[in-house]
Amino acid sequence: MGNSTRGSAAGANPGADHGVHTDPAALLELTDAAEHEPTEVAPDGSVVGYRASRTLPLAVELGRQLRRRRTQLVFGFVALLPFILVVAFEIGDANPNRRSGGFIDLATASAPNFVVLALFVSSTFLLPMIVALFFGDTIASEASWSSLKYLLAIPVPRHRVLRQKAIASGLLSAGALALLPTVALLVGVIWYGAGDAISPTGDAVPFGDSIIAMILAVAYIVVQLSWVAGLALLLSVSTDAPLGAVGGAVLVSIVSQILDQITALGDLRDFLPTHYSFAWMDLISTDIDWTDIANGALLSVVYATVFLLLASRRFATKDITS
């Protein structure tokens, strides 16, 4: 009798062994209709008082994601990275008076240059990985915990589950991408001062204008990485392994960057999703060329739209067994 009771309790809490709050009792907070209104069946077979729009509130989903350890670790590392870079320059022999060279050589010239460095060194791997983590883990993790079927049984419509989780992942990704330059700017002002942004071509952009350029750069990076978000979400609804979804999106990003280095591909490289990854660097100039920025944003939006449509179709027709 004792073993049977424990077995029933374990079956009712599929997420207990994973350290997450995904048991049915916790999932009931996703809809306030079920808590305050009796279950009555209307003549057409629907439940009286049920409103699909009241299920899975965004605030609840966002709160669940913020309480997860992986989210806290990501934001913690992003905030720590600028301090790591400062230590690296303090240990090295950086020359803050240098007025020419690459963005790395000019990193200690001013706070805006330090922000450019932080974005430059993280754009190749770290930032795509963060976006892939938030979007690739969102559906696949629920499936791996066997809580997705409980979520849909509340019931929450499938399209709403996908939409709410995608919005929450987008907010977390944008927050992490904005946190890095914000902390880097504060650290840069303290260590290197609020001077002009110096470009490799020798242009000096005033501090105020450089802040606007940084805001536009972050906005572009968010849009440019939307293709990673769409691909990761597609993989997330296609597998029950979160690591596979996240790793798959990161792997595609790496392969695209490798192919972009092969000049023999010629104009075909223009269609690679990572070809315009660093177009935001054109903003650090007194005469901005918007061509690559516009091309990069358009290409990424097209890729993201295709991946999101495929993800929606896949999730709408997939058999949910876990």
Image (spheres, rainbow, N blue to C red):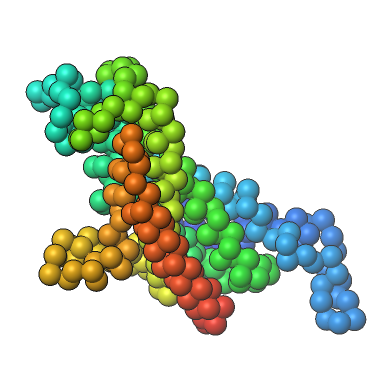
Where, quadrant-wise, is the N terminus in this rendering? bottom right
Tell which of 99 and 87 is nearer to you. 99
Q: Quadrant of residue 24?
A: bottom right
* Number of marks: 0
Who's the residue at 65% across and 58% down the image?
A: 56
Q: Is residue 109 left or right of residue 57?
A: left
- Residue 156 drawn above or below residue 223: below
Looking at this view, is 54 or 144 the one in front?
54
- Residue at x 85%, y 69% (from the top left corner): 48
In the figure, residue 111 lies in which quadrant? top left
Decide if residue 258 is on the left or right side of residue 48: left
Q: Where residue 57 appears, x then y in whole percent?
A: 66, 54
Q: Residue at x 63, y 66 (%)?
A: 160
Residue 138 showing in the rendered view: yes
Q: Where is residue 135 shown, x and y percent of the image?
A: 44, 59
Give the residue displayed 30% in from the left and 53% down from the top: 277
The image shows residue 261, relative to residue 104, as above or below, that is: below
Pick whichever, 174 or 301, lies toward us.
301
Q: Residue furthest front?
A: 287
Name the spot of residue 65 as percent of width and height, x first. Answer: 51, 50
Q: Percent x, y for residue 128?
A: 33, 54
Depicted 30 relative to depicted 50: above or below: above
Q: Nearer the viewer, residue 77 or 293?
A: 293
Q: Is residue 118 left or right of residue 31?
A: left
